[in-house]
Amino acid sequence: MIDQPIQCRVADWIQDKDALKSIRHRVFVEEQKVPVELEWDEYDETATHFIVTLSGQAIACARLKSDGQIGRMAVLTGYRNQGIGQELLRFVLRTAAEKDINEVYLHAQVSAIPFYEKQGFISVGEIFYEADIPHREMLKKIC
Ligand SMILES: CC(C)(COP(=O)(O)OP(=O)(O)OC[C@H]1O[C@@H](n2cnc3c(N)ncnc32)[C@H](O)[C@@H]1OP(=O)(O)O)[C@@H](O)C(=O)NCCC(=O)NCCS
């Protein structure tokens, strides 16, 4: 269990790029076998990125696109199931509200749907596949 407070903050894609890329590579490319060419896209340049640190070490990340899509939510394996993902998601939602985004959406891996339901996201539409992983769209009104 972690015994220090974590810090959630808005990241800088240039300055924090190595840390963000390292987390996403470990979680999505290595662990979940997402093809590396799908992991990085043009939205990384313009999205708002988030980083969580523990004692200065980057352990989790997420991003928010300007159209309200939350994605690339990842917590390193050794730090899961301790509330870090939920705290990060709350921080992302607060930031979206500050940006006057009325509704956020995401493509949830089906296994992670209960994680998002805990913060009021609702599933819509059919299951679809991205990187061979079943997903479902989820929405949440925030303003
Ligand atoms: C999904 C993820 C970000 C959750 O982060 P986390 O720090 O482990 O989550 P938390 O500890 O804050 O919250 C876990 C809570 O959500 C619930 N939950 C439901 N499905 C879950 C799932 N697939 N993964 C994690 N938690 C899940 C847990 O039961 C727990 O509830 P509880 O606190 O009442 O016991 C993390 O597991 C992860 O990085 N997974 C790999 C990447 C991924 O799948 N990202 C999501 C893409 S849509």
Image (cartoon, rainbow, N blue to C red):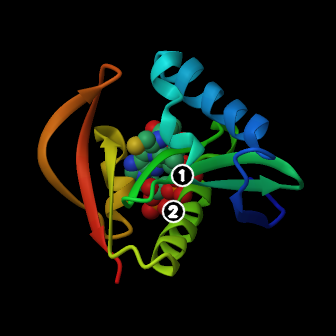
Nearer to me, 101 or 119: 101
C-alpha span from label 2 to label 1: 15 Å
Residue at horizontal 26 percent and vertical 37 percent from the top: 135
Horizontal relation, residue 111 to residue 79: left or right:
left
Residue 4 — which label?
none
Q: Mark 2 near ligand 1 (CB under 8 Å)?
A: yes
Q: Position of residue 68 (x, y in %)?
A: 38, 61
Residue at horizontal 14 percent and vertical 54 percent from the top: 124
* SS of the residue under disc 2: helix
Give the number of the mark in front: 2 or 1. 1
Question: Splitting the image into 4 quarters, where does residue 115 fall?
Answer: bottom left
User: Do we see residue 33 in this rendering?
Assistant: no
User: Do we see residue 118 in this rendering?
Assistant: yes
Binning the other alpha carbons within 10 Å of mark 2 as few (below 14), some (14 to 19) or many (20 upward) gives many
Residue 89 — which label?
2
Q: Is residue 37 above or below residue 112?
A: above
How many marks overall?
2
Horizontal relation, residue 37 to residue 16: left or right:
left
Nearer to me, 50 or 4: 50
Which sits earlier in the primary sequence, circle 2 or circle 1?
1
Q: Mark 1 near ligand 1 (CB under 8 Å)?
A: no
Residue at horizontal 26 percent and vertical 62 percent from the top: 139
Q: Position of residue 40 (x, y in %)?
A: 54, 29
Question: Splitting the image into 4 quarters, where does residue 30 fall?
Answer: top right
State the residue position of label 1.
Answer: 47
- Three-letter amino acid code at disc 2? Leu
Quadrant where the image shows the C terminus: bottom left
